[in-house]
Image: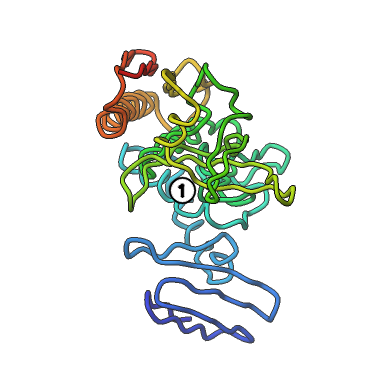
Amino acid sequence: MCINYYNVCINTMANTITESKSFGTVRGNGYLHATWTIKNGKFISSEVSKCALGIYEKELENKKQNEGISTLEEFNERVEDVLNVIGFSSKRVGFDQFDKKYYDEESIYHYSIKGSRNQYMFPRGVVCLNKKNEFFFDVANIVYMINENAIPAQYFDFPEINDTNFNIPRSSGIIQYGGFVPNSSFKISRTRGCIYLYVEFISKEDGLDYQKSISFKDFVKLNEITKFLIKIPKLNKSKYNFSNYTYLDDLLINEIIIHYNSKIIEFINMFITKQFSGYDVTKDHENFKYIFTKK
């Protein structure tokens, strides 16, 4: 087997490969479809691909030598590694993606990363974990939010409207009622630099369901919004049961909580400064609660 970031050749029995410069699909024996991609110069593959390419066995060998995470850097890397593959739908049965261990299938839960629906439709955008590792999931939500410049819609409260029945502008110029797409986010556009939200509606013309992105500016103007609130969940040690938990030691857990709570404050301050200059903001950094009132 030979793998190169830009040219892939596989010398295994009855396997063929199709590839491009940044994305490929492995087809094993005509039945198995496994995908891989390159992100920031790093090889990233689906769960099926790791098995097909023999990568997973090497990972297991490495994990046997280290049954825990000992530094903030290692923790950060583990969370990023899991987020890097949420675009793939294949998962290993009974496998916790964060601590890389197998559990009874009944004890593995599937969670959608909060606010990921703008990019991923289920079963993509999902991570699998044992309940005891819920702390990893909560941190992953923070990292995803910061990396994507996106705040989950569920963190917003608009007291002047109904979240499932507000005015939405159509490209035809028609205004009709709709709501936020579940598990979507308010995201800063990389190309336009302003906030867009993901909405859904039933077309008056054909009765079909549609989804589209609209600008925050159009949203607040059409719905005459003068105030709203953002409340972001804060990492709180008391939420978790860390008794007899050995994968992270107590000092590291404290360091992680302090680090990521401070990251949330940095992020929301950036978001407010760049996107909400037309509002007076009451900041409660202690509880991560922010009240916006139109100037």
Could you say where residue 138 lies in the image, as x and y percent from the top left? Answer: 48, 31
- Would you say 128 lies left or right of 189 here? right
Could you say where residue 231 lies in the image, as x and y percent from the top left? Answer: 44, 20
Residue at the outermost front position: 173
Q: Quadrant of residue 268?
A: top left
Please say if 12 is above or below 22. Answer: below
- Would you say 107 lies left or right of 63 here? right
- Would you say 254 lies left or right of 118 here? left
Please say if 48 is above or below 225. Answer: below
Q: Quadrant of residue 295?
A: top left
Could you say where residue 30 lies in the image, as x and y percent from the top left? Answer: 69, 80
Q: Nearer the viewer, residue 286 or 152?
A: 152
Mark 1 residue crowding within 10 angstroms, few (<14) / some (14–19) / many (20+): some
The residue positioned 70% from the left and 42% from the top of the image is 104
Q: Nearer the viewer, residue 173 or 166?
A: 173
Residue 259 visible in rendering: no
Please say if 276 is above or below 59. Answer: above
**According to the image, label 1 marks what residue?**
83
Q: Nearer the viewer, residue 184 or 295?
A: 295
Q: Nearer the viewer, residue 123 or 238?
A: 123
Please say if 40 is above or below 247. Answer: below
Q: Amino acid at mark 1?
A: Leu
Where disc 1 sits, the SS reads helix
- Would you say 263 lies left or right of 38 here? left
The residue positioned 49% from the left and 63% from the top of the image is 45
